[in-house]
């Protein structure tokens, strides 16, 4: 029996940023597969490459080298217009900062991605928006503006906007980062609810508590995927190094 084709497959993906004469290797030889229906968390310290990885998965950035297959299609070398087209149909992105437009109502914010999709009638767009808002329990707030909502409600609207186009995968970049613990917990419970309904989710977080919500955890350190034991050893070594620098009077920054 043939193994199911992964929804996402990264093969030896590298990302190098060049500034003047300095090269920064943000990602080094990433191999990753995500199957349809997975809930994956990507965890690691600040600066380890989490956001860079998510930007590549979301087709917001391109790898320096390596292959990226989305539903079996190579997408690493597509041009800007082609990436935007696939992103609109296949990927829902949840931003840490919500990124809602203050002059648009909740309904209009959620509808926005659909306005770039040809072939949908106004009635179809309305049905999609109300379905998405119902999934996040905010169908009664369609006429409100972002400023009239709590932070947790704004993030729920952002989740609805990511869901509205019925994407193949939801990508969440620190979705609780701008929320207090109560609202953060509520958003995590919402993501679990969506996963139980069949959503495929890949979430970046620096918080091990939230990483534990996922079915599978991927650990990043210095641009590489490492196992949990290796991550712990590297963290301990980094802590010892910082403590030694402080003891000698040489701060890290």
Image (cartoon, helix red, strand yellow):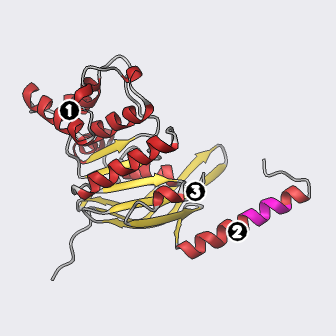
x then y, percent, for residue 224: 54, 65
User: Eyeballing the image, is 186 above or below 140?
Assistant: below
- In this figure, which residue is indicated by the disc labeled 3? 48
Q: CA distance from mark 2 to mark 1?
A: 47 Å
Q: Main secondary structure of the magenta part?
A: helix
- Secondary structure state at the residue bearing disc 3: loop
Indicate left or right for 169 with 14 as reference.
left
Q: Quadrant of residue 232?
A: bottom right
Mark nearer the N terminus (2 vs 1): 1
The residue indicated by pointer 2 is 236
3 or 2: tag closer to the N-terminus: 3
The N terminus - image quarter: bottom left
In terms of depth relative to the viewer, which is nearer, 132 or 81? Answer: 132
Q: Residues within 10 Å of mark 3 (few under 14, many from 20)?
A: many
Residue placed at 91% from the left, 58% from the top? Answer: 248
Q: Which residue is mark 1?
A: 114
């Amino acid at each position: 029996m043939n193994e199911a084709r992964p929804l996402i497959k990264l093969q030896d993906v590298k990302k190098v940023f060049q500034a003047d004469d300095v090269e920064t290797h943000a990602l080094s030889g990433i191999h990753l597969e995500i199957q349809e229906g997975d809930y994956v968390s990507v965890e690691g310290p600040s600066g380890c490459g989490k956001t860079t990885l998510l930007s590549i998965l979301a087709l917001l950035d391109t790898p320096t080298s390596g292959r990226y297959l989305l539903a079996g299609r190579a997408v690493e070398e597509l041009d800007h217009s082609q990436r935007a087209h696939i992103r609109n149909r296949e990927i829902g992105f949840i931003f840490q900062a919500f990124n809602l437009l203050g002059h648009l109502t909740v309904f209009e914010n959620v509808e926005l991605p659909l306005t770039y999709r040809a072939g949908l009638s106004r009635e179809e767009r309305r049905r999609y928006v109300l379905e998405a808002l119902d999934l996040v329990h905010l169908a009664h707030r369609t006429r409100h503006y972002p400023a009239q909502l709590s932070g947790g409600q704004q993030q729920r609207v952002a989740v609805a906007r990511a869901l509205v186009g019925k994407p193949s995968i939801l990508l969440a970049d620190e979705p609780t980062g701008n929320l207090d613990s109560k609202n953060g917990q509520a958003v995590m419970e919402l993501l679990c609810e969506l996963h139980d309904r069949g959503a495929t989710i890949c979430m970046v977080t620096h918080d091990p508590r939230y990483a534990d919500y996922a079915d599978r955890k991927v650990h990043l350190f210095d641009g590489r995927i490492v196992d949990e034991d290796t991550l712990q050893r590297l963290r301990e070594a980094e802590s010892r190094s910082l403590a030694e620098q402080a003891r000698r009077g040489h701060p890290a920054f």
